[in-house]
Image (spheres, coloured by chain):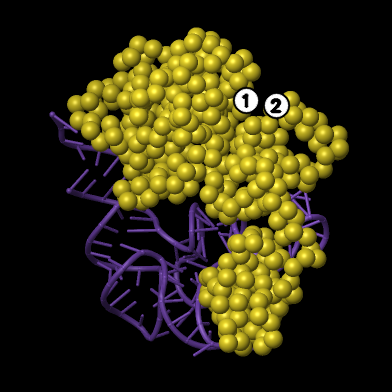
Amino acid sequence: MGTNKAPQPLVNESLINELTTRAIAEIYPSPEMLAKELKSGRRLTAYLGIDPTMSDLHVGHVSQLLKLRLLQKLNHRIILLVGDFTGMIGDPTDKSATRIKLSREEVLANAAGYKQQAGKIIDFNDPVNPAELLFNSKWLSQMGFAEVLELASEVTVQQMLERDMFQRRLKNNKPIALSEFLYPIMQGQDSLAMDVDIEVGGSDQIFNMLVGSTFIRRHKNKQKFIIAGELLADPSGKKIGKTEGNMITLNDTPLNMFHKIMLWGDAITPHALELCSELPMTEIEKIIHDLASGKLSGKDGKMFLAGTIVEGLHGEKIAEQARHEYLDLTSKSSNPLVTELQTAKVTKGQNIVDILVESGLVSSRSAARRLLLSNAVRVNNQTINVDWLVPTSDKKLVLQVGKKMHANFRNLSIIE
RNA sequence: GCAGGGAUAGUGAAGCGGCCAAACACGUCUGACUGUAAAUCAGAUGGCUUAUGCCUUCGGGGGUUCGAAUCCCUCUCCCUGCACCA
């Protein structure tokens, strides 16, 4: 590493404009100052930190990764930081209770897929300006108590307590672990250790990111810029993807991703296009206009959204294929024979209740019976009841529970 | 350390000796309607070889009782006062 000569930063008005205005919640100290810095010709170092608390990155990360991508295009140095050390403490942001600490093993396991998934958006293999992957345990695990105290003295308890989520917990008499106060300090130390100029993050990270700016100002005597992106939400402010089932990870298959996006409310389309795609803002304006005038239906708008997001991650060809498979899967008449269905082996005469449990589609026999009673189970698109047994004639059957997710389908291959 | 209060299913929260597998709300799942969207309406939501049957659940353990989520003892954890405090 580091044998290449650092590339010369580009000054591209439209990219810089995109970077400083699109999907932005806040830029510190100001968008203008950031734009000015980006045009200074100095090569800047920017980073996005992600705690490996989950095994996969999700759509929420896309807009921030796109910010990094823009910076990469402008030839600035970009870093994806895996918070393998901080992840073991747990960020208190937006948590009403102390977060459960993760074990070292869990953290590393979760971090494993990040590079590959983030690689769909930022380029780790660029010959001239590759993105870098760093782990913050590298410096945080080396710190002594004296250094920690030194940094801790630069942040006041009052500043910490200003945070809503701490206030809420104080009011509700919920505990606040002292280690949670140290979280922003560790994140600030990340900025110091990498000597960054820009930190990219969600608007929920503003407090933590500002601590880093404070440290940088005091210790490096320069301004660290903060690009705080908007969080994906529908117009009523409801956050997207908070529930497990609707969580779209960058590891989802294209079809799955396409389908999950189609389950979002229609109202999200413009916001999601702005955040999660690279579609030019002028195009998005047009979509908004067409949606408002009725020229584009809510459904078609969302189809477009799903196609655009999947294309951004997997390319045009695969996106088109996902679209076809989705249409195929959802058309009422066709047999839902799609690629990549999981297979379960069954024997002739086997009872449907057993099959449902053994194939992992439902968690208990009681649950299976309940679903059967409510007409939720289909074989080859035919609703079946509790008494159904594997027939002697067919060789392959498609079993479906409910009509929602791709994951609720199984190919049944019958053995003698 | 002392004195009080609390721990109930995914979450919040009722229940305070039998009618409790446990109200209600949220969430989740399913059905209808749709665009396998949203909204709305309806049902379900511990498990079991489907049973107006059995088993396991109300922080852990032990007891009282014909019978305990409910009473007593004890342990663990949390909260609130008071005391102590580098």
The C terminus of chain A - image quarter: bottom right
Labels 1 and 2 touching (C-beta < 8 A): yes
Question: x%, y% of residue B38?
Answer: 72, 49
Q: Secondary structure at mark 1?
A: loop
Q: Which chain is purple?
A: B
The N terminus of chain A - image quarter: top left
Q: Amino acid at mark 1?
A: Arg
Q: Which residue is mark 2?
A: A281
Which colour is chain A painted? yellow
Question: x%, y% of residue A50?
Answer: 43, 37
Hey, which quadrant is residue A232 in on the image? top right
The chain containing the residue under callout 1 comes to A
- Tell me what residue is drawn at x 31 percent, y 48 percent: A104
Hey, which quadrant is residue A148 in on the image? top left
| Mark 2 nearby-residue class (10 Å; few <14, some 14–19, many ≥20) | some
Tell me: residue B74, above or below residue A86: below
The chain containing the residue under callout 2 comes to A
Q: Which mark is residue A22?
A: 1
Question: x%, y% of residue A299?
Answer: 78, 46
Tell me: residue A225, above or below residue A256: above
Which of these two is toward me, A308 or B56?
A308
**How many labels, in total?**
2
Question: x%, y% of residue A93?
Answer: 44, 36
Which of these two is toward me, A54 or A157?
A54
